[in-house]
Image: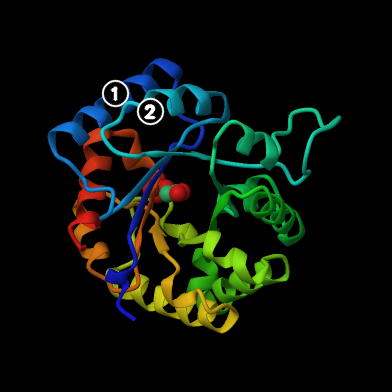
Amino acid sequence: MSGSAITPWVIGNWKMNPVQAEAQQLVSEFKTLLEQQAIDAAQCHLGVAPVAIALGSVQEQLKTAVRPVYTVAQDVSRIAGLGAYTGEVSAELLKDSQIGFVLVGHSERREIFAENVQILNAKIQNALAAGLTVIYCVGESLQQRESGQAEQVVLQQICDIAAVVEAEQWQNIVIAYEPIWAIGTGKTASPEDAQAMHAKIREGLTQLTSYGPQMAILYGGSVKPENAVELAACPDINGALVGGASLNAASFHQIAQAFANTQ
Ligand code: PGA
């Protein structure tokens, strides 16, 4: 199936950046760009994932954007509901604050914060049960790629979540393929390599769920305006999860345009 039938998503992952004043400036510049050069909402979903303490203020600022731009949480607790869990933010609390999207499985969470399958699955289960859409990140390390294991590792990461995703919940999952060696390094997978992996992911998803052919599979890892057009042209690349380049309003807008233009 051609990826062009799937509305692309471009999501900015701000990670632990920037300070409040700069975040406000960034959103304000992005809103102005959207006014000057429209990106039709039907051609591309847009989202930004600020730090937890900025979710509310960014969401408020985005309410007056000319088109929907979703506010995305970077993380969610593995504990559901409310209770004595110091430091945690549950899926229910995100939902209560009208945050409808969350990243789960980012390699920085897997590696730096030792999030294993059990933890990630608890997060996904809670998020889906609360009605959130999960952007589930997968990707192989350089060593895994060089030893020919990339495909197996990534497909295993996809299969891992099948234990907790109920049949109808697959429509609330977006996949982000982010080869770890391409994140923040300036190295991008070639469009051919990225497309090949995305096609494998699509095959794997289609074996797990009837929603597989229509699920969005985003690419992430040093996406910038210079490589976005080529990546966007690949049939199974349905958008981008953008780190560094999303901290610049003009770059983020250009990347979004590249994907919107495929529609
Ligand atoms: P990058 O990050 O665009 O800075 O490589 C992508 C990500 O980690 O989501």
Answer with left or right where residue 231 lies relative to residue 161. Answer: left
List the single residue furthest toward the right. Answer: 84
- Residue 213's label in the rendered image is none
Q: Nearer the viewer, residue 123 or 183?
A: 123
The residue tagged 2 is 63
List the single residue furthest toward the top. Answer: 21
What's the residue at 36%, 39% (across, down)? 69
The relative height of residue 65 versus residue 242 in the rendered view (above or below) is: above
Q: Nearer the viewer, residue 175 or 157?
A: 175
What's the residue at 29%, 74% (across, down)? 235
The relative height of residue 52 versus residue 123 in the rendered view (above or below) is: above
Answer with left or right where residue 160 lies relative to residue 67. Answer: right
What's the residue at 61%, 42% (across, down)? 75
Image coords of residue 144 (percent x, y): 55, 71
Give the residue type at disc 1.
Answer: Ser
Give the residue type at disc 2.
Answer: Lys
State yes or no: Cβ of the residue under disc 1 lies below 8 Å from any atom of ligand 1: no
Neighbourhood count class around disc 2 (C-alpha, 10 Å): few under 14, some 14–19, many 20 upward: few
**Residue 105 location, quadrant:** bottom right
Is disc 2 placed on a helix, strand or loop? Answer: loop
Task: Name the mark nearer the viewer: 1 or 2.
Answer: 2
Q: Is residue 162 visible?
A: yes
Q: Are marks 1 and 2 in contact (CB under 8 Å)?
A: no
Image coords of residue 175 (percent x, y): 49, 62
Q: Is residue 18 visible?
A: no
Q: Nearer the viewer, residue 152 or 8?
A: 8
The residue tagged 1 is 28
Image coords of residue 245 (percent x, y): 31, 41
Answer with left or right where residue 125 lies relative to residue 63. Answer: right
Please tell me how many numbered marks the rendered image carries: 2
Per the model, the C-alpha gap separating discs 1 and 2 is: 11 Å
